[in-house]
Image (cartoon, rainbow, N blue to C red):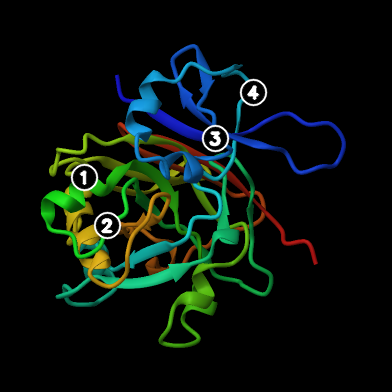
């Protein structure tokens, strides 16, 4: 059975912000791993042994509240135009190098939290993505080092305000609105020696029960190991860093007519063998 690690919110009373804990999600219960969140847990050099051997406080799975998988990571690196069919539907040629942009941690939400629709945008789109979480500090990685640096995989939806994204040649402003990016519910721990992991996961997105994206990660132009190699040639990757690997075809912006998310829309992002996020869109509080 795959090891599943998560960051969960503990019940609180009053209006205080819920405390979070790193847990291992077993079949019958979640087991406290002794760290406040998964970023802190992955920062321990022996985290792989601790992930299987720790026997902390138990929490029932019923009603478990998932926080963003990696709260406040040092970096969120996103990859654009990385599925062949999506590149073709956008009318572009295949890239020679990965297209990279950043996202800030305030954009991240839990796997079942509400997506807050960006104020002022009339073109909010879905983007189902495989997420990579880093488990070992790495710089200038070769293929073996890159594979070993990957802690595992998770589910991401890079919800995007297309009108803001396309105001300029730089995409950041459409990609990092607060409380828009579901991540989770858990991390599926990767075998550090397996360079082929994540080669062929089925990935889907449904909006209001309609399948709008349906592909596999085999269509990625740059796979997880290649991305870690390339990004680590630019900057040191550290435990807890999140890499969103890009989205397949089927986004709303290229439909005729375009289709966008609205208040009440329900987005389900699923990667077989990894997990599922389910999020309802709500209006921004002004």
Residue position for label 3: 35
> Which is more N-terminal, label 4 or label 3?
3
Dot 1, crowdedness within 10 Å: few (<14), some or many (≥20)?
many
Could you say where residue 183 lies in the image, as x and y percent from the top left? Answer: 48, 47
Instruction: Determine whether label 2 and label 1 are within 8 Å by CB.
Output: yes
Work out whether 33 lies above or below 252: above
> Which is more N-terminal, label 2 or label 3?
3
Which circle, 4 or 2, is nearer the viewer?
A: 2
Q: Residue furthest bottom?
A: 168
Query: CA–CA distance between discs 1 and 3?
Result: 22 Å
Instruction: Determine whether label 1 and label 3 are within 8 Å by CB.
Output: no
Instruction: Determine whether label 3 and label 4 are within 8 Å by CB.
Output: no
Dot 4, crowdedness within 10 Å: few (<14), some or many (≥20)?
few
Q: Secondary structure at mark 4?
A: loop
Q: Residue at x 38, y 42 (%)?
A: 154
Which circle, 1 or 4, is nearer the viewer?
A: 1
Could you say where residue 11 lies in the image, as x and y percent from the top left? Answer: 73, 28
Q: Residue at x 44, y 62 (%)?
A: 75
Residue position for label 2: 138
Work out whether 59 lies above or below 84: above
Residue position for label 1: 148
Dot 2, crowdedness within 10 Å: few (<14), some or many (≥20)?
many
Residue position for label 4: 63
Q: Residue at x 80, y 67 (%)?
A: 286
Closer-to-camera residue (239/267): 239
Query: CA–CA distance between discs 3 and 4?
Result: 20 Å
> Which is more N-terminal, label 2 or label 4?
4
Closer-to-camera residue (187/285): 187
Query: CA–CA distance between discs 1 and 4?
Result: 34 Å
Q: Residue furthest top?
A: 28
Query: CA–CA distance between discs 3 and 2?
Result: 22 Å
To which quarter of the image does residue 53 belong?
A: top left
């Amino acid at each position: 059975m795959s090891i599943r690690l998560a960051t969960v919110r503990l019940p609180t009373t009053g209006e205080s912000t819920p405390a979070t804990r790193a847990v291992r999600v077993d079949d019958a219960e979640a087991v406290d791993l002794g760290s406040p969140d998964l970023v802190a847990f992955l920062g321990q050099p022996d985290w792989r042994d601790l992930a299987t051997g720790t026997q902390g406080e138990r929490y029932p799975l019923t009603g478990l509240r998932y926080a963003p998988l990696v709260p406040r990571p040092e970096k969120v690196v996103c990859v654009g135009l990385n599925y062949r069919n999506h590149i073709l539907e956008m009318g572009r040629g295949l890239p020679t190098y990965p297209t990279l942009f950043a996202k800030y941690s305030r954009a991240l939400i839990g796997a079942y939290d509400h997506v807050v629709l960006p104020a002022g945008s009339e073109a909010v789109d879905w983007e189902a993505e495989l997420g990579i979480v880093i488990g070992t500090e790495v710089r200038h990685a070769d293929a073996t080092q890159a594979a070993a640096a990957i802690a595992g995989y998770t589910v991401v939806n890079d919800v995007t305000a297309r009108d803001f994204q396309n105001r300029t040649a730089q995409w950041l402003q459409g990609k990092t609105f607060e409380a828009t990016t579901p991540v989770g519910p858990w991390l599926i721990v990767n075998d550090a020696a397996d360079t082929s992991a994540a080669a062929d996961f089925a990935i889907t997105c449904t909006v209001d029960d309609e399948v709008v994206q349906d592909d596999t990660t085999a269509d990625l132009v740059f796979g997880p190991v290649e991305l870690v190699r390339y990004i680590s040639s630019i900057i040191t990757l550290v435990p807890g860093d999140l890499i969103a690997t890009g989205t397949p075809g089927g986004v709303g912006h290229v439909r005729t007519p375009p289709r966008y998310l609205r208040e009440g829309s329900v987005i389900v992002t699923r990667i077989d063998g990894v997990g599922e996020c389910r999020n309802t869109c709500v209006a921004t509080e002004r």
